[in-house]
Amino acid sequence: MKKIIITLLSAGLLPTPAVLGQPAQQRHVPTQAIIGNPLPQDQNLVQFDLNFPGGTPRQLVEAIEKASGKPLNAVIPDEDADLHLPPLKMRAVNVAELFAALSQASSKQINVSGGTYNSSYSFQTASEINDNSVWWFQHFKPAITQPECRFYQLAPYLETYKVEDITTAIQTGWKMLGEKNPPTISFHKDTKLLIAVGEESKLRMIDSVLQQLAQGKPQPQRESSGTKSAEPAKK
């Protein structure tokens, strides 16, 4: 009797063939978790295949509308209307995934005067993400620095150097830094002024060059107070 009971208990602990044959259940990961979008999102967003050859933001919106078969509410500022977007080829995506990928792909660092800035662009929305959301195109870019005009008196330096020597040294510094848009400089002969127009951080090169040239100028020798010129001997 004990043997029969043990056998029955063992059989009850074994999983049935039906359970063993079933595949492990896969956890559904919402699209919101994939793209990291903090806004609530409709899980039934329309999916579509997109083959965008590249173009303006407006052309991308038109391509999305054609591929999805639904209108897309989008606002594009005039200043970004002509921005060129790269080609995009995707399968089974929705607008939230597409715009998140566009933002990541366009993110890059730009070196400008004053530091390094992150630049990117994409479509953003402030409401719950669904097929009727209103999107606006946003382009993150560094602010444009206004140019300055400065004047440098070169008369003291021209006693030792030529104008061409000074301007060449300045331009060489900009070239070695890889400046693609260096300041514009011009020498006014009548006043011996060097006139420069450009960004403040780039104009510092002129100050640095003139400072070094001033250190290299020969200093006038002072006559010692105890030294007297010899008088010619009288005959």
Image (spheres, grey):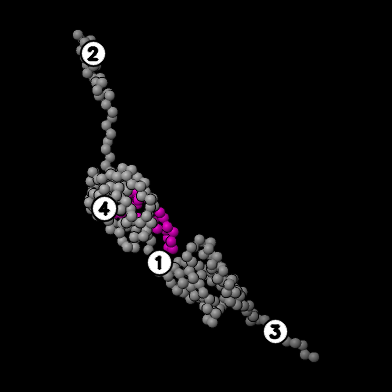
As drawn, 98 above or below 175: above
Mark seen at residue 7? 2
Q: Which residue is mark 3?
A: 229
Which residue lies at the image location 38% right of the left edge and 56% below the top edge?
A: 84
Instruction: Determine contact: label 4, label 1, CB under 8 Å.
Output: no
User: In this rendering, does residue 3 appear at all?
Assistant: yes
The amino acid on which the numbered mark 1 sits, given as a three-letter code, is Thr
The mark total stands at 4
User: In this rendering, does residue 35 appear at all?
Assistant: no
Say whether disc 4 or disc 1 marks the residue closer to the N-terminus. Answer: 4
Q: Which residue is mark 4?
A: 72
Mark seen at residue 2? none
As drawn, 107 above or below 167: above
Q: Nearer the viewer, residue 35 or 223?
A: 35
Say whether disc 2 or disc 1 marks the residue closer to the N-terminus. Answer: 2
The amino acid on which the numbered mark 3 sits, given as a three-letter code, is Ser
- Distance between the Cα atoms at labels 4 and 1? 35 Å
As drawn, 43 above or below 125: above
Left or right: where does residue 206 sit relative to residue 146? right
Q: Quadrant of the C terminus?
A: bottom right
The amino acid on which the numbered mark 4 sits, given as a three-letter code, is Leu
Image: magenta residue range: 99-124
Q: Which residue is mark 1?
A: 145
Q: Nearer the viewer, residue 100 or 59?
A: 59
Say whether disc 4 or disc 2 marks the residue closer to the N-terminus. Answer: 2
